[in-house]
Amino acid sequence: MLLVAGLADLAVSTLGTAMGTVRGLLRRSDTGRLVEDAEQDLRARGRLALDRYAAVPPAHLEVLAQHVLERRSQADG
């Protein structure tokens, strides 16, 4: 019972804080610019997340083999 009451109190205080933030944003004259910046930020984060998880990294042994070949060619040349 105390846990539920504590969670409810946390939700109410968080909601109150969020509403205050929203009210403050609505009063700003540069709200449109803030929305554009947030959209650009989300797109950039999306690109980074896709790049991080969609791209297959090169095989580790293949990278090591390429380094060995480069060093051998530098030593011979």
Image (cartoon, rainbow, N blue to C red):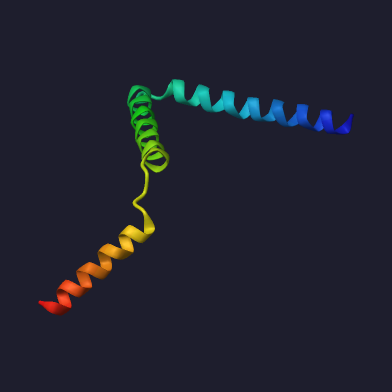
| Image quadrant occupied by the C terminus | bottom left
How many numbered circles are shown? 0
Q: Is residue 4 left or right of 18 when viewed as pictured?
A: right
Q: Is residue 25 left or right of 29 when viewed as pictured?
A: right
Most foreground residue, 70 or 43: 70
Q: Would you place residue 4 above or below residue 51 in this image?
A: above
Residue at coordinates 39% horizontally, 33% vertically from top-left?
46
Q: Is residue 60 left or right of 67 when viewed as pictured?
A: right
Most foreground residue, 9 or 74: 74
Q: Position of residue 9 (x, y in %)?
A: 76, 29
Name the residue at the bottom extreme.
75
Most foreground residue, 55 or 6: 55
Q: Would you place residue 65 above or below residue 23 in this image?
A: below
Residue at coordinates 53% horizontally, 28% vertically from top-left?
21
Name the residue at the left extreme.
77
- Kindly indicate the quadrant of the structure image that contains residue 61: bottom left
Q: Is residue 25 left or right of 40 when viewed as pictured?
A: right
Residue at coordinates 40% horizontally, 43% vertically from top-left?
52
Q: Position of residue 16 (x, y in %)?
A: 64, 26
| Image quadrant occupied by the N terminus | top right
Residue at coordinates 69% horizontally, 29% vertically from top-left?
13
- Kindly indicate the quadrant of the structure image that contains residue 11: top right
Q: Position of residue 48 (x, y in %)?
A: 37, 40
Q: Would you place residue 66 above or below residue 27 in this image?
A: below
